[in-house]
Amino acid sequence: MRSRETSRQRFTFYKKQLKARLRGETPPPSRRGQSTPRKPRSRSAFALFTAFMGMLRGHRAVLGLSIGALTASTLIGLIPIYAPKIVVDSVLGDKPVASWLSSLLPPTEQPRQLLAVLAVTVVVLTCIAVAIGLWGRWQATRVSKRLQVEVRKDAFDHAARLPLHRVQELKSGGVAGILRDDAGAVGGLIFEMLYNPWRAIAQLAGSLVILMFVDWRLLLGAMMVLPVVWVTHRTWISRIRPMFHDV
């Protein structure tokens, strides 16, 4: 099985054809199309994820801090969900505040004072969650842009070493499209594969914990809804969504 020709070999063969034409001889037949076709590369999702994590070498510490900040901001932002229970039980109702919670709140005697404390606490916690979340997202964005630059540089260096026939196969604008779109999309995987999925997991886990403290029956109802959500989501991905792509 013959390996693919290099640009130097193709140019040498072209000169032989040109000399044969100048001498009035029949040039040797072109060998274009006789090279062994390349097999399409197919790798598993785990192999692609491993390769992607290898590209993050040198950025993992910053990305880890970003994921940690995302987790903290998500969990802090879920704490105010517990405030309506306190309002219903202790402000509108006659139930005393739980002992573990009363030690965290300043001493109050009137329901209006408790309501004011809860309002201020919710605003402060929301501001803290937003500040931490913005810092973490900024760090993730920095890593994403730096990874885009590194991948584009590696792709350009690889394209510069390609033989001429490979560049010709890419056709006009092919290399530019690869550098601009394909290589640049690798940086977006930080949000699509790590940042956004982790935020969804943290929100789901935190929401279930809050529901457990509010009322165990709410937690039971949420757990019963999860299989329905999973089935509908899988149905959309596997059956309904491909129908729109075929139209």
Image: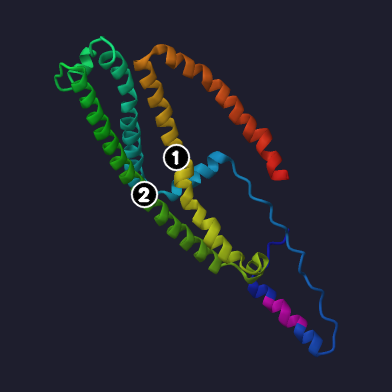
As drawn, 103 above or below 191: above
Residue appearing at x 67%, y 66% in the figure: 169
Residue 30 lies left or right of residue 129; in this view the side is: right
The residue pinned by badge 2 equals 59
Left/right placement of residue 219 relative to residue 160 reads left
SS assignment for the magenta stretch, majority: helix
Magenta part of the protein: which range? 11-17
Q: Position of residue 52 (x, y in %)?
A: 48, 47
Q: Quadrant of residue 10?
A: bottom right
Work out whether mark 2 precedes mark 1 in sequence or the reverse, and give the earlier one. 2
Label 2: few (<14), some (14–19) or many (≥20) C-alpha neighbours in 10 Å:
some
Tell which residue pokes out farthest to the bottom in this image.
23
The magenta stretch spans residue 66: no
49 lies above or below 183: above
To which quarter of the image does residue 148 belong?
bottom left
Q: Characterize the local packing of mark 1: few (<14), some (14-19) or many (20 or more) Cα atoms within 10 angstroms.
A: some
Q: Which mark is residue 196?
A: 1
- Residue 16 colored magenta? yes
Tell me which amino acid carries mark 1: Asn
**Residue at 51% over, 53% down:** 185
Q: Relative to 239, is 64 on the left or the right?
A: left
Quarter of the rendering occupied by the C terminus: top right
As shown in the figure, which amino acid type bears the numbered disc 2? His
Question: Can you say which quadrant of the picture contains the N terminus?
Answer: bottom right
Residue at (41%, 55%) from the top-left corner?
145
Residue 151 on image: x %, y %: 47, 57
Residue 92 lies, in percent from the top left, at: 28, 15
Foreground pick, 235 / 181: 235
Which quadrant would residue 36 be assigned to in this image? bottom right
Label 2: element kind: loop
- The residue lying at 26 percent from left, 14 percent from top is 90
